[in-house]
Amino acid sequence: MLFNKKAKKETITDLDNELENLTIAMMTMDKSSDAYAKTVDQYVKLKEVKSKYENKTINPEVILTTAANIAGILLILNYEKAGAVTSKAISFIRGRG
């Protein structure tokens, strides 16, 4: 079933409201009662439904950071491939002997 973003957001908001109502109701119930157990079952089922509606996309900042890291690694590899590191830099690393 496909929904547009507005309908999806409204559905998630409705689910959040219902979950909040169930939480408030459970606070006043006897924890050992059948009504409490049924309410907990409803809560768990609604959480499962909500998780199916929630967006599963990757944060754009994570993609940007990863791309920047890969670009940096590629720049370093190309720089080393050009042989710029092997000239005087290696003599400094070896020290004076």
Image: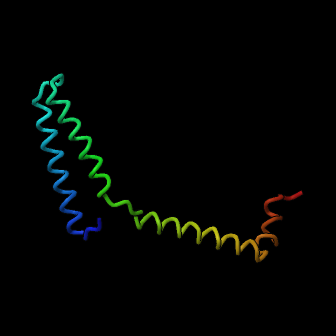
Percent coordinates x, y for residue 34 in the rendering: 16, 27
Q: How many marks?
A: 0
Taking the spot 12% from the left edge, 38% from the top edge, the residue there is 24
The one nearer the camera, 66 or 14, is 14
Q: Quadrant of the N terminus?
A: bottom left
Percent coordinates x, y for residue 39 in the rendering: 17, 36
The one nearer the camera, 56 or 62, is 56
Above/below status of 49 relative to 60? above
Percent coordinates x, y for residue 11 in the rendering: 20, 59
Taking the spot 78% from the left edge, 67% from the top edge, the residue there is 89
Taking the spot 26% from the left edge, 41% from the top edge, the residue there is 44
Quadrant of residue 60 in the image?
Answer: bottom left
Q: Quadrant of the C terminus?
A: bottom right
Left or right position of 16 against 80? left
Q: Residue furthest top?
A: 32
Q: Residue furthest front?
A: 1
Quadrant of residue 75 in the image?
Answer: bottom right
Above/below status of 49 relative to 68? above
Left or right position of 90 against 11? right
Q: Residue furthest bottom?
A: 82
The one nearer the camera, 23 or 78, is 23
Above/below status of 90 relative to 46? below
Taking the spot 53% from the left edge, 69% from the top edge, the residue there is 67
Percent coordinates x, y for residue 59 in the rendering: 40, 63
The one nearer the camera, 2 or 90, is 2
Colouring: rainbow
